[in-house]
């Protein structure tokens, strides 16, 4: 299996794990500034771990200015994604982890197709479109109508903005890989794409979070407010968020360096992201697991395999062989059309 596909699968699972801890931190944060404080703590931890990792690997933190600028922009989008995700759970998204994750992941598929086609000149054929439609159908089944009953909750808006921030970080990572391949910016090592990226990204996250705290009257005394649980509990959760943040940031950046396509990667990424977060919500937050959720998640398998890049791996597992046999006539029909 291609390296970038393994990295994409790992990224989705790490994001799902991080989403669970976003829910835990959001539930413990009584005010917006507590959310900003938790986000700043995540940024500081990423910055510290990134710096130490770079020193151990003898990587320079002060690399080419264009790479630093790209890493800072990546971190800026990461700040918004982390902050808004915490806020979504602060304002009620914990009601259904799968619904929140659906909004963040599935609604990004259509923009990803357009960005991949027009910004990075990727070919979007009938197979890719059909796979994307199946994935959206699977996500729509996951979206529980009961979760949105009685109006349009505030947390839905925060989830939508989180989706836009996640799209921005993916576009930044792909742009860096695209410009590196074109020789427009200096190529850096894999370890620099891991540790130096997280150092400068952590700088951006910390600076933005501290800005909220310093320019807010409430933020100046945030430690004096009562947390819903002891502060060290939030610190422990923030550490897990920082580590998982480092993991998926690194998988995304290195995956694009290994040639991950912008659009197709969204299908296995969304499947792993949704699956991990949904089952985590069931196990930790006791979310319901009706048959519709299981069906929605299962639809991601044919969504991945119908794409030509996923088709090559259909012989790797017994379940995949079943989907290969069922979809083979449709796949060849679409292939003749294009």
Image (cartoon, helix red, strand yellow):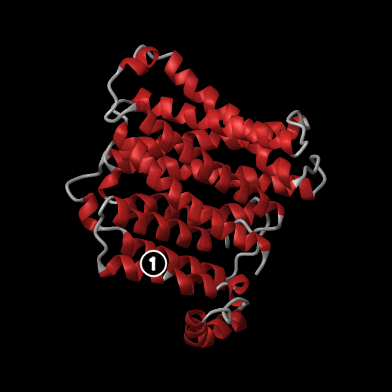
Q: Which is nearer the eye, 267 or 282?
A: 282
Q: Is mark 1 on a helix, strand or loop?
A: helix
When asked about the image quadrant of residue 294, the answer is bottom left
Q: Quadrant of the N terminus?
A: bottom right
Residue 72 appears in the rendering: no
- The picture places residue 67, in percent across and down from the top left corner, at 73, 35
Q: Which is nearer the eye, 326 or 223?
A: 223
- The picture places residue 221, in percent across and down from the top left corner, at 36, 13
- The picture places residue 262, in percent across and down from the top left corner, at 61, 56
Measured along the vertical axis of the image, is residue 325 above or below residue 20?
A: below
Residue matched to label 1 = 297
Instruction: Judge from the rendering whether residue 280 lies leftward or rightward of residue 43; answer left or right.
Output: left
Q: Which is nearer the eye, 122 or 261?
A: 261
Q: Residue at x 38, y 16 (%)?
A: 219
Q: Which residue is drawn at 36% across and 18% down?
A: 223
When asked about the image quadrant of residue 196, the answer is top right
């Amino acid at each position: 299996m291609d390296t970038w596909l393994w990295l994409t699968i790992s990224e989705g699972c790490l994001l799902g794990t991080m989403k669970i801890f976003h829910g835990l931190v959001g539930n413990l944060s009584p005010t917006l500034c507590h959310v900003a404080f938790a986000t700043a703590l995540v940024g500081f931890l990423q910055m510290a771990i990134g710096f130490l990792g770079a020193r151990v690997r003898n990587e320079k933190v002060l690399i080419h200015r264009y790479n630093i600028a790209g890493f800072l922009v990546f971190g800026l989008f990461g700040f918004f994604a982390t902050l808004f995700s915490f806020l979504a759970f602060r304002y009620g998204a914990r009601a259904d982890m799968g619904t929140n994750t659906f909004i963040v992941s599935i609604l990004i598929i259509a923009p990803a197709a357009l960005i991949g086609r027009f910004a990075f000149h990727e070919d979007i054929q009938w197979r890719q479109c059909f796979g994307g439609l199946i994935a959206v159908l699977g996500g729509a089944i996951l979206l529980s109508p009961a979760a949105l009953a009685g109006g349009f909750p505030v947390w839905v808006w925060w989830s939508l903005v989180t989706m836009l921030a996640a799209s921005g970080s993916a576009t930044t990572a792909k742009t860096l890989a695209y410009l590196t391949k074109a020789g427009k910016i200096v190529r850096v090592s894999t370890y620099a794409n891991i540790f130096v990226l997280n150092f400068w990204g952590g700088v951006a996250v910390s600076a933005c979070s501290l800005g909220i705290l310093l320019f807010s009257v409430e933020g100046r005394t945030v430690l004096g407010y009562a947390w819903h649980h002891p502060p060290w509990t939030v610190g422990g959760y923030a550490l897990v968020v920082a580590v998982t943040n480092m993991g998926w940031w690194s998988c995304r950046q290195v995956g694009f360096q290994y040639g991950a396509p912008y659009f197709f990667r969204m299908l296995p990424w969304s499947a792993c992201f949704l699956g991990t977060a949904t089952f985590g919500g069931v196990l930790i937050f006791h979310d319901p697991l009706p048959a519709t959720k299981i069906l929605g998640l299962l639809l991601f398998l044919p969504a991945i395999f119908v794409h030509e890049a996923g088709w090559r791996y259909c012989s790797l597992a017994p379940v995949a062989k079943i989907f290969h046999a069922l979809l083979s006539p449709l796949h060849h029909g679409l292939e003749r059309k294009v």
